[in-house]
Amino acid sequence: MLKKQEKRHRKHKRVRAKIFGTAKRPRFCAFRSANHIYAQLINDENGKTLFSVSDLNLPSKKTSEKNKKDLKGKMLRAYEIGRLIAKKATENKIKEVVFDRGGYKYHGRVKALAEGAREGGLKF
């Protein structure tokens, strides 16, 4: 019997076999733990992480009024992380990325992260 984490690693290996980040279109990698969410932009040609953000280093608790009533807690933090990484990407003239969901289902916090990045200006 496979553990939940082992199943996720197998799914992630299958996803990673199909996607590849370049300098013009880096890989937008999502990782979620029980309490936090992390996002990175990675150039797989060089094997370098361009930059990363997590909810540990959110600048402040301010949120847009539109989404305050829709999202709460971890979902809201994931959405804000998506917007923050999109802001950093546009500052570095990156408009398109390849989304790597990390073996997680496209649901919940991973979906909120992606939606925040899309609203911030990134194209998947």
Image: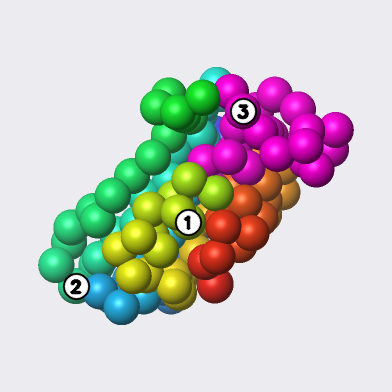
Which residue is at a point 85% across and 33% down the rendered structure image? 69
Of the numbered discs 3 and 2, the one sitting upstream in the chain is: 2
Point out residue 30 in the picture as x, y percentages from the top left corner. Answer: 47, 48
Confirm whether the magenta stretch covers residue 69. Answer: yes
Question: Label 3 to label 2, Cα distance in Å?
Answer: 36 Å
Q: Is residue 29 visible?
A: no
Residue drawn at x 61%, y 62% as measured from the top left:
118
Mark 3 Cα-neighbour bin, 10 Å: few <14, some 14–19, many ≥20: few
From the image, which quarter does the N terminus lie in? top right
Residue to which mark 3 is pinned: 62
Residue at numbered disc 2: 45
Q: Nearer the viewer, residue 87 or 124?
A: 87
What residue is at 25 percent from the left and 66 percent from the top?
43
Quarter the C terminus occupies: bottom right
Residue pointed to by mark 1: 86
Query: Of tags 3 and 2, which is closer to the observer?
Result: 3
The answer to which of marks 1 and 3 sits earlier in the sequence is 3
In this orientation, does residue 25 appear?
Answer: yes
Magenta residues, start to end: 61-82
